[in-house]
Image: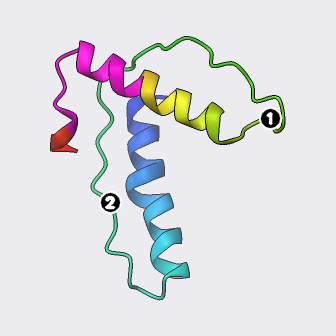
Amino acid sequence: MTPATATTQVGTIDTSWFQAVSYGQFGGWNATAVNWQQIPTPPMDTARACGNAFRSTIQSEGDQAARDQGYDLGSY
């Protein structure tokens, strides 16, 4: 996936879907892909393949990778 593809997916395709299912209540996202960050593969949850711990690990690792690159997460 390229940064342009990711930007289109979130900023256009996903936004359109959320706007449709919310009957126009969702305002949309302004999306811009920045430098790709690599994070360690998170361990799978024992109960479910993609449970909350799995997603939480991806988010915390991604947040840390962004902070390490100097991004201010409060700006997003």
Give the dominant element type of the magenta stretch: helix, strand or loop: helix
| 26 horizontally vs 59: left or right | left
Q: Above or below — where is 24 with respect to 28?
A: below
Which of labels 2 and 1 is toward the front? 1
Give the residues drawn in magenta, as a range: 62-73
Residue with the mark numbered 2: 29
Question: Would you call the spot at circle 1 few (<14 residues within 10 Å), some (14-19), or many (20 or more)?
Answer: few
Residue at 32% from the left image edge and 60% from the top image edge: 29
- Do we see residue 23 in this rendering? yes
Q: Which residue appears at 48% of the width and 49% of the height?
A: 9
Label 2 packing within 10 angstroms: few (<14), some (14-19), many (20+): few
Left or right: where 22 falls relative to 74? right
Quarter of the image that includes the C terminus = top left
Question: Disc 2 and disc 1: Cα gap in Å?
Answer: 28 Å
Which of 1 and 65 lies nearest the eye of the viewer? 65
- Residue 68 drawn above or below residue 20: above
> Where, by quadrant of the figure, is residue 74 drawn?
top left
Position of 7 with respect to 53 (left or right) is: left
Q: Amino acid at mark 1?
A: Ala
What residue is rendered at 63% in x and 34% in y? 53
Q: Nearer the viewer, residue 12 or 26?
A: 26
The residue where tag 1 is placed is 49
Give SS at disc 2.
loop
Q: Position of residue 48 (x, y in %)?
A: 81, 39
